[in-house]
Image: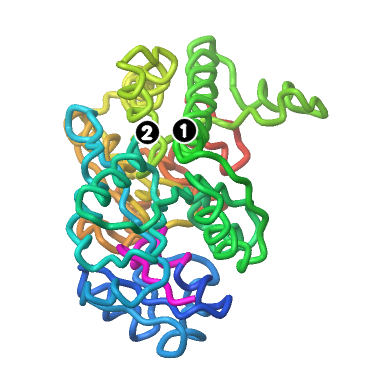
Amino acid sequence: MQIVVVGGCGHVGLPLSVSLASAGHIVTVFDINERSVDSVNNGIAPFWEPELNEALNLNVGKSLFASLDKSVISSAEIVIFIVGTPVDGHLNPDPNSVVRSVSEVANLLRDEQLVVLRSTVFPGVTARVERELNILGKKSKVVFCPERIAEGYAMKELRTLPQIIGARDSHSADRATLLFESLGIKTIRTSPEEAELAKLFTNTWRYIKFAAANQFWMMANDAGVDFENVREAICFEYPRADDLPGAGFAAGPCLFKDTMQLSAFSNNTFALGNSAMMVNEGLPLYLVERLASKYDLSALKIGILGMAFKGESDDNRSSLAYKLKRILQFKSDGVFTTDPYVKNDTELIDFDDVLKQSDVLIIAAPHKIYSEFVTDKPVYDIWNLRGLGSAV
């Protein structure tokens, strides 16, 4: 198939594009980021993802191309849009962002093309795109096929996780099914609205589970108990609790945003989601308050280890490590930050320098490199990465 991926140089689009090219399709990545497009065409992934760079090098210039020219859209059989629904500073989603993105290139769409919406969208956006294209006289069919990957596992999960096909008619469903089954995975068919909610429910469910663990961690701390010891006792050979996660910063570009989308969709009656947001977003402040009960923070320099939103990732979008940093910059005598993966933060310094200059250390991202270093300074490890407990 001839495929164009709009917005295809990012963490969602590029692994999909490379995987489809590896499956034998001719894939053109259209993106407005000139630096990323040049990087892809030179066989260098613009971000770190296991297996991605190797697969990119095998396909670039053969079955995979990147372009700044949106006219490539007209040559495709299938056009995949990697455009999500952002939330603003007031936590209100903008459901029109995807519609605008499709409308801006609608003149390039052809009637026989299949339009695939891939990123998480506000419920009803697929129907809005369908109506907009109909108003513009376009007969392109629209399906919603949400991405389900986790960063760090994208290339593997694109080849293993079942794909939801949200389609309005059987012919469109058949075409989308053929596309994704070429990756060697199973598919399940739903309506577009069911697929939209399935994606939001999935991310929100994870966010709520993390909030429960973080609330339990706070309660244990306040009682002078190490939550990790409690969790180990709960989960030991007890399958009904084996999905209880450990504590840690629950952030990134998806979980919080999608929970807020679901809250807006329910007319702000989603008390469980709102409570989860308060717990997870409040964790950095709680951590600082616990430290302040032990130390005179105004006399201490604090080192933050890891600024990515998750372990073994270079993605620092919406990372709560930065919220922690802002609070400590106000409360302490100074803050030093480091991360072995993040490249877009000019304030990061070397790990060894952070160890030397800091009085207290906090592991904010569970990179494996932080599991075994030696220091005589206090280390606070919410994640229990070092296996010494998570109490603060």
Q: Give the range drawn in magenta.
A: 1-16
Q: Where is residue 250 in the image (x, y as percent from the top left)?
A: 43, 35
Q: Which residue is drawn at 47% across and 79% down?
A: 56
Q: Name the residue under label 1.
A: 197
* Residue at 21% in and 77% down: 69
Q: Viewer-proximal residue, 309 or 27?
A: 27
* Residue 236 location, quadrant: top right
Q: Do the residues labelled 2 and 1 touch (CB within 8 Å)?
A: yes
Against 278, is 327 above or below?
A: below
Q: Can you identify the residue that label 2 sits on? A: 123
Label 2: element kind? loop
Q: Identify which residue is drawn at 67% across, 55% down.
A: 186
Question: What percent of the width, then of the height, locates residue 262?
Answer: 38, 26
- Residue type of the residue flagged with mark 2: Pro
- Which x, y percent locates residue 160? 66, 58
Is residue 370 visible from the viewing direction of this image?
A: no
Amino acid residing under circle 1: Leu
Q: Is mark 1 on a helix, strand or loop?
A: helix
Outermost right residue: 237
**Left or right of 346: which side holds 360?**
right
As displayed, is residue 389 above or below residue 50?
A: above
Q: Is residue 125 covered in magenta? A: no
Closer to the camera, 260 or 188? 188
Side of 270 relative to 128 (left or right): right
Report if residue 15 lies within the magenta region.
yes
* x then y, percent, for residue 222: 48, 12
